[in-house]
Image: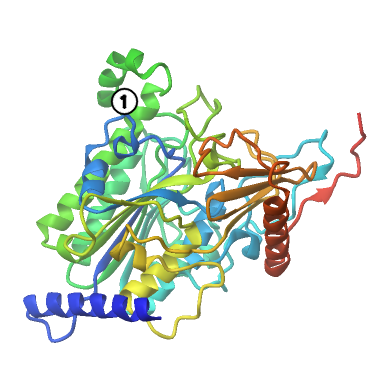
Amino acid sequence: MQNRRHLFAFVGAFLLAVGTVLGQSAPAKPNIVFIMADDLGYTDLGCYGNPYIRTPHIDKLAKTGLRFTEAYSACPVCSPSRAAIMTGKHPARLHLTNFIAGDRKDPKSPLLPAPWTKYLPSSETTLAEVMQKNGYATGMVGKWHLGTADSTSPAAQGFAYDRMIAKNGLDYYNYSITSKGKTVFEDKGTKYLTDQLTDYAVEFIDQHQSQPFFLYLTYSAPHVMLVPRADKLKYYFDHYGKSGGKYDPNYAAMIESMDDGVGRVIDQLAKLNLLDNTIVVFTSDNGGLGLPELGQRPTTLEPLRAWKGHVYEGGIRVPLIFSWKGRISAQTETKNYITGTDFLPTFVDLLGISGQPASPDGRSFARVLKSPEQAVDRGPIFWHYPHFSNQEGRPAAAVRSGDFKLVELYETGKLELYNLKQDISEQKDLAAALPDKTKELAALLRNWRSEVKANMPQANPDFKKP
């Protein structure tokens, strides 16, 4: 409680100071620009150790702020992780546990995937609705992937300005953009999708520079298909040998184009003298791809185990950068772990919003932004993926508490235990060596599933033991 009072005093003093400088009678509310990549791996950025892919603008963003080394998505696939960010609720509580188009089965498995909800219900209160209620202009640009009906669209979920990828979201030169259900742009091979999304982001900032705004910019890059801009490719083909074959040149070029877009957004904020009063966030919706899909394998997640669609670290650990010029210390990093449900309560904390119901699954990490070196006990975080992914992930769950992480494989009931501090690659299963810790975390995971009424895999009536 004392830390929270200190936080509110810190934020209040800052807002009052900004209001005074601008000659306003009321404190200025900070803008929020939340930028999210699609299927960007933890190790795909220069500031996260990648020596091959050029990301100077995102790297600069990290230098001006705070880099998280142990940030997580709430699910190893996209729609559930996005729902968690929007609502502060775990996908298992929402029963939105797979990507919208996902329906894979394995006839040789003893399980069928869990029944699940293929949209974010309009009855849920979104982060955009919270911001809008508190005087913010709200804009969503890019990939939504939480429902296409009128009642589940961005416009119905709190975004007054929406430019949503509609037709052919995976084709970067053959797509359409809609706003409130109507097509506002259609490309036939002339305007690169990533650049078009950046144009809309800049347009939104221009149109709302005189009022506080919340921009949710969700690039489709570097999601497959791997379609780069031709002018970005030569460098990566020239340097392909130096990458050891780990990174596809097309994939790398797509990330560089996204990085250009981030640079344009930051430049526009600076041009309009908004950067000092804007919180900029960059992250990814889940881990990168580790297997070929619509082309060759895009990337590698080493030293993390597995990739998108798996509850191992490669599927759920994501890059996360917070930059707030003058308010978050530059060139800092934190080992405190957070997850996707934590964004909504964090923004509520930072903005001093009162009357907002507590997020049942999220925990504010505002204290971490102020004192990144101070250890904060976030409490356990959970993952529940009762499906078969298109990257060979199988029904599984996991819980992390402190340095320990337990993985439960739903098909066999097998439990695996890892000490992430000592074994980030999850290679040494400690379940047999530490039975008490295994039992403790298994009970924690089981009780949590009961509390959120998680949707579970079903028995496969056609399954025959070999």
The image position of residue 251, as x and y in percent, is 39, 28
Q: Is residue 121 left or right of residue 127?
A: right
Q: Is residue 26 above or below residue 98?
A: below
Tell me if residue 200 can be seen: yes
Report the residue marked by disc 1.
52
Instruction: Give SS at disc 1.
Output: loop
Task: Say left or right for 200 vs 40.
Answer: left
Q: Position of residue 422 (x, y in %)?
A: 51, 40
State which quadrant residue 134 falls in.
bottom left
- Residue displayed at 53% across by 50% down: 403
259 left or right, relative to 68: left
Residue 160 visible within the image: no
When the figure is inspected, residue 51 is found, relative to residue 74, above or below; the finding is above
Q: Quadrant of the N terminus?
A: bottom left
Crowding near the residue tagged with mark 1, few <14, some 14–19, many ≥20 C-alpha atoms within 10 Å = many
The quarter of the displayed image where residue 460 is located: top right
Number of marks in the image? 1
Which is more toward the observer, 368 or 459?
368
Image check: 389 left or right of 223? right
| Residue 451 in the image: above or below residue 259 | below
- At x 30%, y 35%, the residue is 46
Q: In the image shown, does 151 or 283 lie closer to the viewer?
A: 283
Kind of residue at disc 1:
Tyr
Task: Decide which of 372, 119 is in the foreground and name it.
Answer: 372
**How far across and how far down the image is residue 11, in percent?**
25, 75
Name the residue: 21% across, 44% down: 60
Q: Quadrant of the C terminus?
A: top right
> Residue at point 64% right, 60% down?
92
Colour convention of the picture: rainbow
